[in-house]
Amino acid sequence: MFQWSKKVKSVTFEPGVADESLLALVDSHLEKQPDKNFSDLCKEALWQSLCVPESVKPGQMAAVKSGTEQKIAELENQLANLEERFFAKEAHRLEAIERQMLQLSQQVAQLAIAVNQQPVIQYANHSAPAVEAVPISTSNNAVNNPPTDVDPLISRLSQFLEDF
């Protein structure tokens, strides 16, 4: 495993055509980008030669992080808007339900008043004493002397006939 020392590393350009032309290219490149230094150029070249993806490079990480933070902020805003619309819709539905409940309770109260004000109708009680049927006869004896024995079956049936 390669150990790095905390010391600054240096690069030596030898007098030769290859090194001098490379040094000239470095100088011209640094003149075009005054915000960078030789160390930055070396790091960029190493990143490129080692085929490191753009998303992992330190300079790009800040941009990716800032882009990610921006997307997170956008998503948070969208979520807040969605929650606001949802809660407004649910509040409207709740108000509608409360209005309906109030109307229903008023209708129940009106029905209770109407039921209490109507007269109570009592139907004929089936256990009332039965009226005895007296047969009509043309003879005087039958009118003056009604029969004393009444058949119980006739008595019950006469009750139903009266109700009918």
Image: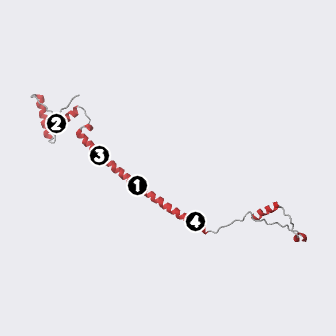
Residue 62 in picture, x, y percent from top left = 24, 42
Residue nearer the viewer, 14 or 131? 131
Identify the residue under disc 1. 87
46 shown above or below 101:
above
Mark 3 or mark 4, which has the lower sequence index? 3
Amino acid type of the residue that numbered disc 1 sits on in the rendered structure: Phe
Q: Quadrant of residue 66?
A: top left
Q: Give the mark count.
A: 4
Q: Are marks 3 and 4 in contact (CB under 8 Å)?
A: no
CA–CA distance between discs 1 and 4? 37 Å
Q: Quadrant of residue 114?
A: bottom right
Amino acid type of the residue that numbered disc 4 sits on in the rendered structure: Ala
The structure residue drawn at horizontal position 12% and vertical position 36%, both measured from the top left corner, is: 27
Element carrying mark 3: helix
The structure residue drawn at horizontal position 60% and vertical position 66%, both measured from the top left corner, is: 115
Mark 3 or mark 2, which has the lower sequence index? 2
Q: Tell me if mark 3 has few (under 14), some (14-19) or many (20+) residues whose alpha carbon lies within 10 angstroms of its own.
A: few
Identify the residue under disc 4. 112
Q: Residue furthest left?
A: 15
Mark drawn on residue 69: 3
Q: Are marks 3 and 2 in contact (CB under 8 Å)?
A: no
Amino acid type of the residue that numbered disc 3 sits on in the rendered structure: Glu
CA–CA distance between discs 4 and 2? 92 Å
Mark drawn on residue 39: 2
